[in-house]
Every structure is written in C-alpha cells, then in structure tokens.
Amino acid sequence: MIIKKVFNDLVFLNNIWQQWEIRPPSFLRLFFPGVIWRVPLSEKKVFLTFDDGPIPEVTPWVINCLKEHSAVATFFCVGDNIRKHPEVFRLLIESGMAVGNHTYHHTKAWKSNRSIFFADVDRFQQVYFSKLFRPPHGQLYPWWIRSLKKQFSSVVMWDVLSKDYHPLLNDEDVVNNVMRFVRPGSIIVFHDSVKSWPRLEKALPAVLKQLHNNGFITETLNQLAPAIDWNL
Ligand SMILES: [Zn+2]
C-alpha cells in the first residue's frame, strides 16, 4: 500500500518535472528579470526558434520546410558555424529569417566565467550584428542580464521546448510536446542540428501543419518592439 502510494507520488512528481522541462514554470522565470520567455499577445501568433546552426545538413532543409508552410523563424546561430558555412548563413538571411546571437563557440555560462562568456558573445557580434541573444542551454546568471541588455534589445529564453534533441523521444513525442503547450505568444525551441534531425524531419512539418490548422501564424523575433521587459 505504502509502496504504491510512494510510486504514485514519484510518477506525479516526474510528470510535473517533465512538464516544467517543456514549459519553464512561472517561479523560475521570476529569477531572470528582463528576459523574454513569451510575448504577451492574445492573438494566435507564435515565434519559432532554431538553435545551434547554421549547418548544411539541416538548416537549408528547415528553411525550405518553413517556406513550404509560409512560416518564418528566428535562428540562434553559433558564430563558428557561420564561419564554417557562410553559404548556408547567406541562405538564412536571404530567406527573410531572423538571426540571433548564441555565442561564437556555444559557450555555456555555468561552465565558463564572465570574461570568457562575454568575449564569446562579442566575437559573434563581429561576425554578425544581432539585437537578439539566447544563452546556450538557457544558462545564465541573473546578474549578467543587465550587461547583456545593454547590447541586445532582447535576451530570449522560451515558452515551449520541443525536446527534439532527445534520443529517447520520437517525432510524435516532439509534436505533442509543442502542441500540448503552445499558446498565443509562445516562443518555441527547435534545433537545426544533426542530433535533432532524426525527430525534426517528421516533427517540423507536422507541427507547422497543426499550428496552421489551429489558426496560429508565425513571426520572427525581429518583428517585436524592442526593449520591453516581458516576464510571463
Ligand atoms: Zn544551443
């Protein structure tokens, strides 16, 4: 009896944890004042984002898939990938997608220090000047935000994490993660990476179709009014 109760409690806690992974809870968002998790909209508009590209194996396919569904997205690029694949990056820019800074070497704040991290952020800006920033893995110290906001109009986290990188999930799980939690103003994370590809290939067209069927349209984060503190 007790074992069953403990088991049920563990399942309950695990469910909550999994939901928090996909949609970060409000109390967590309070620790990062001035960072954007979601855009305060009542219209059915969402902001798709793709992290870690551009790479020739996946990014051009993502651009085509978005175009086929009349969708747009914001790509948080790794500076070193822009250096390695300038033709893919050009494709991104020419297709009207927005580009955000995701550091030059995908430097994680919690495994780095302030001067290394900010130098890597700046190195990206020398390759491409962006007004948008997303820290790799969402890792940030709240007391770094003020400095970042001097450089960027928006420091962008997310409202819905697709978990497309997760090897134990399949494409249907990824679609469900997005469609279960999406709401007006959601910022949704995917990855244009080789790691995500096995799920992304089927999940992205399915998500775009379902978003459309549910009346959602997409915008890039460049289309936002700058410098507003959203903490939803
Ligand atoms: Zn990343």
Image (cartoon, grey):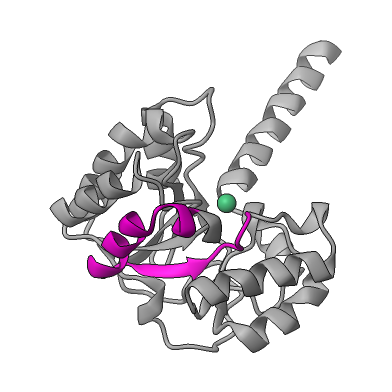
Decide if residue 172 is in sight here. Answer: yes
Q: Quadrant of the N terminus?
A: top right
Q: Can residue 97 be found in the magenta stretch?
A: yes
Residue placed most toward the observer, 225 or 43: 225
Identified at 36% across, 37% down, the residue is 200
Q: Position of residue 220 (x, y in %)?
A: 35, 70
Count of all numbered marks drawn on residues in the image: 0
Q: Quadrant of the C terminus?
A: bottom right
Identified at 74% across, 83% down, the residue is 146
Q: In the rendered view, tell whether residue 160 sits above or below residue 130.
A: above
Decide if residue 181 is in sight here. Answer: no
Q: In the rendered view, tell whether residue 119 sits above or below residue 84.
A: below
- Tell me where residue 170 sits by quadrant: top left
Residue placed most toward the observer, 163 or 30: 163
- Tell me where residue 139 sits by quadrant: bottom right
Q: In the rendered view, tell whether residue 135 sits above or below residue 197.
A: below
Q: Position of residue 158 (x, y in %)?
A: 54, 60
Identified at 40% across, 47% down, the residue is 55
- Tell me where residue 217 sits by quadrant: bottom left
Identified at 50% across, 71% down, the residue is 127
Q: Is residue 203 left or right of residue 50?
A: left
What residue range appears in magenta? Answer: 81-105
Q: Position of residue 202 (x, y in %)?
A: 29, 32
Residue placed most toward the observer, 119 or 195: 119
Q: Position of residue 83 (x, y in %)?
A: 47, 59
Q: Is residue 228 left or right of residue 42?
A: right
Q: Is residue 176 left or right of residue 211?
A: right
